[in-house]
Amino acid sequence: MRLALIGRNSFIARHVHKCAQAQGIEVTALAHDAPSDAVQGMDTVVNFSIDPSWFSQAYRTDRDCDLRAARAAAHAGAHFVMCSTRRVYPDHARFPGREGTPANGDETVYGRNKAVSESAVLAAANGACTILRLSNISGPEHGITGRRQGFFAQMLASLHRDGVIRFDMSPATRRDFLPVEICAQGILLAARDRPAATLNLGSGTPTRCGNLAQWIMEGFGRGTLVVTDNTARDEFFLDMAVWRSHFPRFPLPDENALKDLCINLGRELRDA
């Protein structure tokens, strides 16, 4: 398989690139602004690039990086993999989120933009497309610059700087977290098998956010959890039945795997 990754500096793209090289896959990592003809000769194109305005401004075709990449892939005769988000699910339909639910987006501009983009990409790809709706991707984000900080990055940064993890929600809030290494393996599997489908990619299990914080502090050796608002909000997890029907042997993480990840992240942060 000849694989092109667009947006090579993204957190997930770096892990996909590393995983692809370990598997002996011929991979070309491209910048977010690479010309369209850079994907000529590729079998599969995966896009990780995103316009910063996607988080604050309404949808515009000329700022849709997924659509631009899908069109380039179609012109090259390649399969396209779109990394979408769990935020395409409206708030009343995300515990669990299921692929059959109309993807209208949640309360965020980002979620609504990704929902519109999914439809545009499907039309542009003429069926040669896999859409992956990703859960919260977790991993060693501390110290990464030039990107929006995710939930784990915020925890690690505040713990390292202040010895404190701050929550503006209840520690009992349940969410779906997927280690970035497993996410990378899943993306590569979809890139190789190229199903013409929309698939969730998460752990399929809701985990209490407070548990994650406690495990990270356990690995770090110290720390305090400070809660400024005890309201449970933005709870979600992804139903993984469709994924399992396509990839029945793919190992999804359980809570023990997430615990090991968090403890190791805390240790790495302590030793940094």
Image (tube, grey):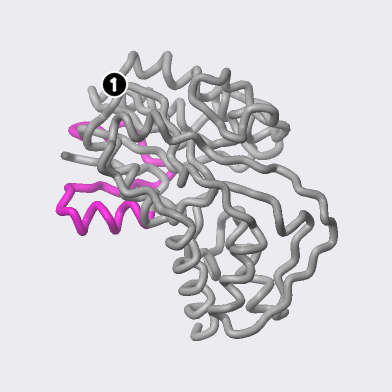
**Front residue of 45 and 190:** 190
Occupied quadrant, residue 151: bottom right
Residue 38 shows up from this direction: no
Q: Is residue 197 above or below residue 110?
A: above
The residue lying at 44 percent from left, 54 percent from top is: 254
- Whether the magenta-drawn stretch holds residue 56 is answered as no
**In the rendered view, does 170 fall on the left or right side of 38?**
right
Q: Is residue 152 above or below residue 214?
A: above
Q: How many marks?
A: 1
The amino acid type found where label 1 is placed reads His
**In the rendered view, does 40 fall on the left or right side of 245?**
left
Q: Quadrant of the N terminus?
A: top left
**Front residue of 59 and 168:** 168
Q: Secondary structure at mark 1?
A: helix
Query: Residue 209 location, x and y as percent?
Result: 64, 57
Residue at the disc numbered 1: 75
Q: Is residue 54 above or below residue 58?
A: below
Query: Residue 261 location, x and y as percent?
Result: 46, 66
- Whether the magenta-drawn stretch holds residue 16 is answered as yes
**In the rendered view, does 65 fall on the left or right side of 159?**
left
Query: Residue 208 location, x and y as percent?
Result: 63, 55
Mark 1 closeness class: few <14, some 14–19, many ≥20 residues within 10 Å: some
Occupied quadrant, residue 146: bottom right
Point out the stretch of residues depicted in magenta: 14-42
Query: Residue 60 location, x and y as percent?
Result: 61, 24
The residue lying at 69 percent from left, 33 percent from top is: 109
The residue lying at 32 percent from left, 22 percent from top is: 196
